[in-house]
Image (cartoon, rainbow, N blue to C red):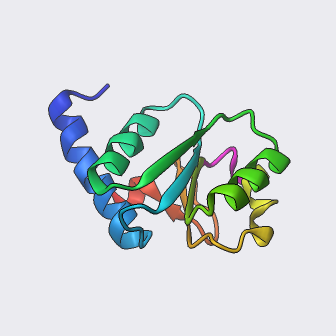
Amino acid sequence: KWSFEELGSLSRKAANVLSEACGLQRGDRVIAVLPRVPEWWLLNVACMRTGIVLIPGTSQLTAKDISYRLQASKAKCIITSDTLAPAVESVLPGSQFLKSKLIVGQGSRAGWLNLKELL
């Protein structure tokens, strides 16, 4: 649970993570493939703050669905949980526009930025 004050503070920090660590700018697209976690709301507000376009995706997307969304949207960043990361990684080699990968969760993965560590 977060208060409105905490959500405001954390969303400003998350906006900085998206802008600085992920190198995103206003108008860039981000795909979020996340289960029902509070960080989904945090990232949603952070995208609104920075003008980044959030493309939400359910955790039930298949690798083919994720690949299609990455190519069609020309997303520069993908955000997912540590449990969904293996499925997402299977389609990343074919994505030519992707600049950064952000993971939400406790675990770490090679080549991925961890949101909790960056906050």
Q: Is residue 106 left or right of residue 69?
A: left
Find residue 34 and report its image quarter.
top right
Q: Is residue 77 left or right of residue 24?
A: right
Residue at 74 percent across and 33 percent down: it is 60
Residue 68 lies within the magenta run: no
Closer to us: 2 or 92: 92
Find residue 19 and report its image quarter.
bottom left
Q: Number of callouts in the render?
A: 0
Is residue 86 visible to the viewer in this orientation of the structure? no
Is residue 82 visible to the viewer in this orientation of the structure? yes
> Compared to 11, does 41 lie above or below?
above
Q: Is residue 107 left or right of residue 7?
A: right
Q: Is residue 33 left or right of residue 23?
A: right
Find residue 90 and report its image quarter.
bottom right
Residue at 33 percent across and 41 percent down: it is 45
x, y percentage for residue 117?
40, 59
x, y percentage for residue 11?
28, 46
- Look at the image and give the residue range highlighted in magenta: 81-86
Residue 82 lies within the magenta run: yes
Split into 4 quadrants, where in the image is the N terminus?
A: top left
Residue at 36 percent across and 63 percent down: it is 26
Split into 4 quadrants, where in the image is the C terminus?
A: bottom left
x, y percentage for residue 101?
57, 63
Closer to us: 63 or 97: 97
Residue at 80 percent across and 60 percent down: it is 91
x, y percentage for residue 4?
19, 29
